[in-house]
Amino acid sequence: MNFFIHKETQRRGVKYYEVGETTFRDGLFRPRTRKEKTICDFKRGFGRQTLPHKRWIWFEGPKEEIVFLKERLELYKKHLAEAPELGPKTKCS
């Protein structure tokens, strides 16, 4: 379907077309499943240029930020340890 949308936007003279998130790696704030990575890889094939996607998080103070980052780091470690491409023997320290 994206192919036909892409062709129609080209026909109409649209210069840029947003296909959504196309990152190809995990991150502390957004661990991705293998399926999500495959979809992003597919969508990357429709463009020549990938632009960064920014996410903003606001904190009341430094202590709140540190608590948030520690929680996210623990979730990310768990995600990496369970990732099938890494295997359960991978250690995160």
Image (spheres, rainbow, N blue to C red):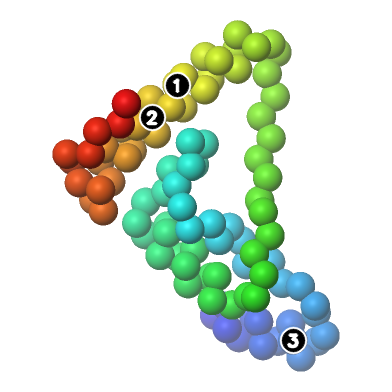
Q: What residue is drawn where x is 43% and y is 27%?
A: 73
Q: What residue is drawn where x is 52% and y is 22%?
A: 69
Do labels 1 and 2 touch, CB within 8 Å?
Answer: yes
Per the rendering, the mark at residue 10 is 3
What amino acid type is highlighted by mark number 3? Answer: Gln
Q: Give the labeled residue for mark 1.
A: 71
Task: Find residue 76 and report its horizontal and vertical position in percent.
Answer: 39, 34
Q: What residue is drawn where x is 55% and y is 70%?
A: 44
What amino acid type is highlighted by mark number 1? Answer: Glu
Task: Find residue 27 and report its horizontal and vertical position in percent.
Answer: 48, 42
What amino acid type is highlighted by mark number 2? Answer: Leu
Q: Is residue 80 left or right of residue 20?
A: left
Disc 1 packing (10 Å; few <14; some 14–19; many ≥20) = few
Spatial separation of the CA atoms under disc 1 and disc 3: 44 Å
Spatial separation of the CA atoms under disc 1 and disc 2: 6 Å
Nearer mark to the viewer, of 3 and 2? 2
Q: Is residue 56 above or below residue 6?
A: above
Q: Is residue 87 left or right of residue 66?
A: left
Spatial separation of the CA atoms under disc 3 and disc 2: 41 Å
* First-in-chain label (1 vs 3): 3
Q: Secondary structure at mark 2?
A: helix
